[in-house]
Image: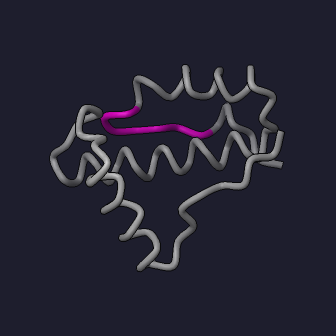
């Protein structure tokens, strides 16, 4: 079982990680799903940082580029919700 409290989000989205973690818990998401969502958030945050963008850079085109790069690398883009 994955422990969401052990997932560390770095980069420009780090300040939002605890709020996101709490919101997922409040909505009834399980530990595994919460951890996976936080890992995806960390990947996105580090991806933004690598391109010199901050959290305000989350425009639809930027997110589409992130998703396209993940897909091209054979990485998962979505996490099935498990509440």
User: From which residue to which does the magenta span run?
Assistant: 7-13
Residue that sits furthest to the front in the current view: 60
In the image: residue 15, left or right of residue 1? left
In the image: residue 60, left or right of residue 54? right
Residue at 38% in and 33% down: 13
Q: Tell me the colour scheme of the image.
A: one colour
Residue at 73% in and 46% down: 33
Residue 63 rendering spot, x and y as whole percentages: 35, 52
Residue 49 rendering spot, x and y as whole percentages: 25, 46
Choose top left, top right, bottom left or bottom right for residue 56. top left
Q: Is residue 42 magenta?
A: no
Residue that sits furthest to the left in the current view: 52
How many labels, in total? Answer: 0
Q: Is residue 19 above or below residue 67?
A: above
Q: Is residue 14 above or below residue 36?
A: above
Most common SS among magenta residues: loop
Residue at 23% in and 53% down: 50
Q: Quadrant of the C terminus?
A: top right
Residue 6 rendering spot, x and y as whole percentages: 64, 37
In the image: residue 41, left or right of residue 24? left
In the image: residue 30, left or right of residue 53? right
Residue 26 rendering spot, x and y as whole percentages: 74, 20
Residue at 40% in and 50% down: 44
Q: Is residue 11 magenta?
A: yes
């Amino acid at each position: 079982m994955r422990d969401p409290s052990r997932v560390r989000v770095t980069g420009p989205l780090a300040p939002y990680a605890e709020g996101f973690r709490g919101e997922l818990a409040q909505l009834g998401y399980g530990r595994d799903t919460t951890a996976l969502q936080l890992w995806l958030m960390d990947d996105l945050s580090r991806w933004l940082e690598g391109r010199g963008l901050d959290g305000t850079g989350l425009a639809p085109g930027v997110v589409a580029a992130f998703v396209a790069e993940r897909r091209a690398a054979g990485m998962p883009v979505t996490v099935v919700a498990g509440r």
